[in-house]
Image (cartoon, grey):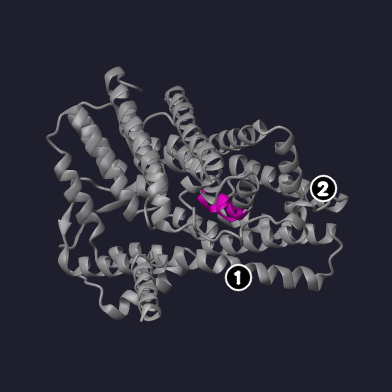
């Protein structure tokens, strides 16, 4: 009888565990897709007139032209078709993901990454403070780089498994790996010192000198980066001293850990050359993005070149290079699918003609507020809009023609309207379920619910800091 009760109790525990299981990310995105589809039947269709702006080269909206249009609801069959459309529209991003993941997988198979991690672990064992120095240096570099717009989620995403492995090897957890890599890129992107894709486009549309107000944005970058570094370091120290306080405690991370054999990996000449080639590739990437107008396609090409060169350095046969590259492609499948599912939400809203209606409704609520309240409302509006329009330049083309005249009417400097745009466009990327952070969690094997528990305090602190900067900008008439 006692044995039967024990079996029943175990079954109950298993059921409870399953009931608490976080839904798969594709299920979460699928639910959002269904909601978006239902909204196309409920939300009245509307549209702004659009025209080509010669200065920015963007198709802008006329803020006074909103009008109702015929309802074009998306039916259940087309809902599924839009997933494929989403993948097609994001084809350049998905191919970059495949190229990056395959190339870095090939690089890892050479043993160069294991050898580098082993060397780092040995140094930190001799001098434990080196681990913190490493985290700080990496976060500062990525945050500053991210603020230029030439290092974004697309470029950093494939490096996450490496940062996670380093984090675990140093005695931390995968959350620290994500916190020291992807998060500072997002914070830097939100600070946007000289980002041509966001600040450049927004200031051009607002008809103010491009990259003007840089000094204030550098201060913002310094403060936001310091907040992020402090948050990550405090959590990292807590995890190291008390592993049970990790958000990942109790979750099997053995497949991410660097084992004893890997920590004994020898740093051969070929592996040194492999790491040098990787560093050169990253430098060339930065140079091309910053000075040559490169974007996603060129970066994907660089990653493919990296794979070939690394294979040759390690004296692999062409067949081995090809087979290993194909094996690495599998690592990018989930990330590519997530991009397609997320983009499907946007294609459905566009097909149903409801994005402009939502924008118009939000703008209507902003009008009539005081200057400071308007600043907060505009920040919230930009944050919500980032969910609907994930592209920074695309979002600028939609929001700035509306925000600029509103700023003029309420007596707000246009530079502040641009500042609010950059805040809303950047920081929310760390939490929106259709953004790259979801892919980051998948790559780091972090349950989405755990990530939100970890990131939300930091997001809240940074959001309040942004409101403080907006208030300061209003008080000083920042221009």
Describe residue 203's horizontal placement relative to residue 318 as left or right: left
453 left or right, relative to 299: left
Above or below: residue 416 compared with residue 11: above
Question: Where does residue 312 sit, x and y in percent of width and height?
Answer: 83, 60
Q: How many marks?
A: 2
Q: Does the magenta stretch include residue 153?
A: yes
Instruction: Indicate which disc residue 330 carries.
Output: 1
Residue 43 vs residue 20, the one in the foreground: 20
Q: Nearer the viewer, residue 422 or 157?
A: 157
Outermost residue toward the left? 368
Residue in the picture at 16% in, 62% down: 43
- Quick one: label 2 or label 1, which is nearer the N terminus? 2
Give the image location of residue 178, x and y in percent: 53, 48
Q: In which quarter of the image is the C terminus?
A: top left
**x and y percent of residue 460 in the render?**
34, 38
Q: What range is drawn magenta here?
A: 152-161
**Residue matched to label 2:** 272
Q: Does the magenta stretch include residue 263?
A: no
**In the displayed structure, does residue 350 sit left or right of residue 197?**
left
Eyeballing the image, is 285 above or below 418?
below
Instruction: Look at the picture and state if 208 lies above or below 453.
Output: above
The residue at the point 18 percent across, 70 percent down is: 41
Using the rendered image of the protein, determine whether residue 206 is visible from the camera's viewpoint: no
For mark 2, give the secondary structure.
helix
Residue 443 location (% of width, % of height): 54, 59
Residue drawn at x 24%, y 35% as measured from the top left: 376
Q: Badge 1: how crowded within 10 Å, few (<14), some, or many (20+)?
A: some
């Amino acid at each position: 009888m006692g044995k039967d009760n024990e079996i029943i109790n175990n079954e109950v525990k298993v059921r409870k565990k399953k009931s608490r299981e976080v839904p798969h990310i594709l299920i979460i995105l699928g639910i959002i897709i269904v909601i978006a589809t239902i909204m196309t039947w409920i939300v009245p269709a509307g549209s702004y007139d659009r025209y080509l702006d010669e200065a920015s080269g963007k198709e802008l909206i006329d803020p006074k032209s909103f009008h109702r249009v015929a309802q074009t609801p998306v039916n259940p069959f087309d809902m599924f078709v839009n997933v494929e459309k989403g993948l097609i529209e994001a084809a350049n991003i998905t191919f970059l993901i495949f190229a990056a993941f395959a190339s870095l997988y090939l690089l890892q198979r050479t043993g160069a990454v294991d050898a580098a991690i082993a060397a780092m672990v040995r140094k930190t064992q001799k001098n434990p403070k080196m681990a913190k120095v490493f985290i700080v240096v990496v976060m500062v570099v990525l945050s500053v780089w991210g603020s230029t717009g030439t290092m974004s989620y697309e470029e950093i995403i494939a490096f996450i498994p490496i940062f996670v492995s380093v984090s675990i090897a140093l005695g931390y957890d995968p959350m620290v790996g994500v916190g020291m890599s992807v998060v500072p890129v997002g914070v830097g992107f939100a600070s946007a010192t000289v980002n041509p894709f966001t600040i450049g486009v927004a200031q051009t549309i607002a008809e103010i000198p491009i990259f003007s107000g840089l000094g204030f944005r550098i201060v913002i970058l310094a403060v936001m980066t310091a907040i992020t570094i402090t948050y990550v370091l405090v959590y990292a120290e807590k995890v190291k001293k008390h592993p049970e306080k990790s958000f990942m405690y109790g979750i099997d991370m053995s497949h991410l850990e660097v084992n004893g054999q890997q920590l004994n990996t020898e740093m051969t000449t070929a592996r040194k050359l492999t790491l040098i080639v990787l560093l050169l590739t990253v430098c060339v990437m930065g140079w091309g993005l910053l000075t040559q107008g490169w974007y996603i396609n060129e970066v994907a090409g660089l990653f493919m070149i990296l794979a070939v060169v690394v294979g040759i350095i390690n004296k692999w046969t062409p067949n081995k290079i090809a087979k290993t590259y194909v094996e690495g492609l599998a690592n990018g499948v989930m990330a590519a699918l997530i991009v397609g599912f997320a983009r499907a939400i946007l294609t459905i809203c566009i097909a149903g003609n409801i994005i402009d209606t939502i924008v118009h409704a939000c703008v209507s609520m902003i009008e009539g507020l005081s200057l400071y309240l308007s600043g907060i409302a505009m920040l919230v509006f930009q944050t919500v809009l980032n969910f609907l329009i994930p592209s920074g330049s695309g979002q600028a083309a939609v929001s700035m023609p509306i925000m600029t005249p509103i700023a003029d009417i309420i007596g707000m400097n246009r530079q502040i309207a641009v500042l609010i745009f950059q805040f809303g466009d950047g920081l929310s990327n760390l939490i929106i379920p259709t953004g790259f952070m979801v892919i980051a969690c998948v790559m780091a094997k972090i349950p989405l619910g755990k990530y939100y528990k970890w990131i939300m305090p930091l997001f809240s602190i940074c959001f309040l800091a942004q409101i403080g900067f907006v208030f300061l900008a209003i008080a000083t008439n920042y221009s």
